[in-house]
Amino acid sequence: MPTVLSVSGSPSAISRTSRLLRHLDARLNSHGHRVIKLDVRTLSAQALLGADFQHPDIVATAELFALADGVIIGTPVYKAAYSGLLKSLLDLLPQDALAGKTVLPLATGGSTAHVLAIDYALRPVLSAMGAAHIVQGRFVLDRQLNLREDGSLDIKPTAAEALHRVLDQFSDALGQAPIAAAS
Amino acid sequence: MPTVLSVSGSPSAISRTSRLLRHLDARLNSHGHRVIKLDVRTLSAQALLGADFQHPDIVATAELFALADGVIIGTPVYKAAYSGLLKSLLDLLPQDALAGKTVLPLATGGSTAHVLAIDYALRPVLSAMGAAHIVQGRFVLDRQLNLREDGSLDIKPTAAEALHRVLDQFSDALGQAPIAAAS
Amino acid sequence: MPTVLSVSGSPSAISRTSRLLRHLDARLNSHGHRVIKLDVRTLSAQALLGADFQHPDIVATAELFALADGVIIGTPVYKAAYSGLLKSLLDLLPQDALAGKTVLPLATGGSTAHVLAIDYALRPVLSAMGAAHIVQGRFVLDRQLNLREDGSLDIKPTAAEALHRVLDQFSDALGQAPIAAAS
Amino acid sequence: MPTVLSVSGSPSAISRTSRLLRHLDARLNSHGHRVIKLDVRTLSAQALLGADFQHPDIVATAELFALADGVIIGTPVYKAAYSGLLKSLLDLLPQDALAGKTVLPLATGGSTAHVLAIDYALRPVLSAMGAAHIVQGRFVLDRQLNLREDGSLDIKPTAAEALHRVLDQFSDALGQAPIAAAS
């Protein structure tokens, strides 16, 4: 059973990015994946920004990356790129923390003008960390994600369909990983 | 037997990029792949730069992309990015010409200062064309590639080793493609 | 009187990018600039794609870049980046062809999803060529540019206003160049 | 007298990036500029990563940006891009925090393979924040910067010369700003 680490890089307490990832967890479970949730904002801010590689939060997180077969990286788009919070964590991981892993990049933002931030800003960083397979990602407009009062998320049908497609491709790619390792 | 389209985007008649791709063909053959060679510089320049989608050269090339399971994209790095020649061809292909395909990006250049051109310039374009899996690419320094007088290529051992590693990863990823399609 | 080289990188015979640049020429003239027009598609395709640095078209174009104080680079966005035609020309110019010059990047495209192509794809290339000052550029949607039957261009007011603003900033920056050179 | 905000985005207590910026301050002073120093790592980590726009540290920093005529942005290169610490601060500034300002991007790193991170990763973010003029930046290799035991910095002559050249261009560009504003 492949293990997926699902990482939200949103600094907001009430975050569309975070809710979106949690929504996708259920579908991953139904595909037979074990999902581990990680909200970067719950880690020690002091450790993240102080280059404290030995802090228990950072050590534990590096272990989560090490044991994951697949990683979902979710981030809001700020200033035409990923969040500083997300990058603060990536900076503290080993250079090859994504080696051999399948990665799904997801981003949320207020305007379609930010769509290319996934391919031009986020992917190069994930590639530099050795990712074996970065599947086609997805940018979701904030207005396609409505936070209901009960805390659940309402996703517009067109966005949901596209998300499920990239998630299924990610899931398929994960299923192949052991075969690749055996060859 | 997977089919690999091996594309050289170098405008030079005597090109390290082109020779490098030809050198890798033999290894791909030994992995059981059928290799089709394409030197973009042999296509009609008038068609490439005149947006002539109906030109026989362009139509035939689009068909080669359509039937390929995997594509190797090789380019020299000029002005911090891929060659204009390569992009001229990509511009004339369908928007989703790489959908469902495995792609290996390779680049050559005179300085390690150009290494990031693969991830920041070339990959976003390949991703925009729908590539299913862009494996880890490789940048090779010109001085690691010596053209012998008999036309053959002498690759420095460290470069050869790295190239064979990414080529084998590409080959493995290609072998998985049919499984993905069946799932 | 500063000289501006206005370069269209569109491969289309009937091009919004090209018409847009021609429209802006009049405003530059009214600012007291001398404008030289260049449609890359009128240069020898064989020279552009064959790395023929000695071809008269390429030699003459390199001279135009050398004498210009400012350069407008206009391109359609294809496959998330500038046109191959434009890059083919840039590849043949000296590495420092934009040194000491003020540059205005403009792009046209069918969707706002391509907006970031200016900053992530085009600017790094212009910067690698030594541009002293790349002013804020502008992305214009195709649907904001209507080609009239008489060949003239009708620009939607909001787009026209934004274009005039970046053009005036470019013009101001050009006016400063001699002062910088004297310091 | 133009005011320059000199920002170090290094998370390390003993940082080459930070020492480098402090070294350049003296030269800026000799050019007649007032220099304000900012080490992002001294700001509240909780505020930076918690999207706390109202925190006194963030409010005060936003004011420093608002009053500066020029901004130097210094960052180490990690994972092929700027530091997460730097981006955490930029994320909390107004979208147009660099509007009308002259910006000098500087980066340090262990390998020339990271050179393009300035143009492909950092500049697009600075451009998205409205920077009027991002002058040619500079990447400095760690081994060109020796921290002496007394805390001072020894810069290799070739690196020092290149740094002084981009600093002087930045200084010249700053001197022009008032003229531009008046036109």
Image: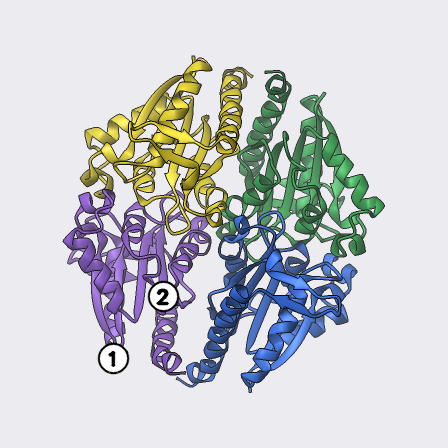
Chain colours: A blue, B purple, C yellow, D green
**Other residues around mark 2 within 10 Å, as few (<14) / some (14–19) / many (≥20):** some
Query: Tag 1 or tag 2, which sits nearer the N-term?
Result: 1
Relative to D2, is C146 on the left or the right?
left
Secondary structure type for disc 1: loop
| Residue D31 image-quadrant placement | top right
Residue D6 x %, y %: 70, 37
Residue at 65% from the left image edge and 78% from the top image edge? A36
The answer to which of C102 and C172 lies nearer the viewer is C172
Judged by depth in the image, the label closer to the viewer, 2 or 1, is: 2
Three-letter amino acid code at the position of disc 2: Ala
Q: Is mark 2 on a helix, strand or loop?
A: loop
The type of residue carrying mark 1 is Met
- Relative to residue D15, is residue C36 drawn left or right? left
- The chain under label 2 reads B
Q: Residue B99 carries which label?
A: 2
Residue D102 seen by the camera: yes
Residue D73 occupies quadrant = top right
Q: Name the residue under label 1.
A: B1
Residue C101: quadrant of the picture: top left
Q: Mark 1 — on which chain does it sit? A: B
| Residue at 62 percent of width and 62 percent of height | A145
Q: In the current view of this chain or complex, which residue is farthest to the right?
A: D56
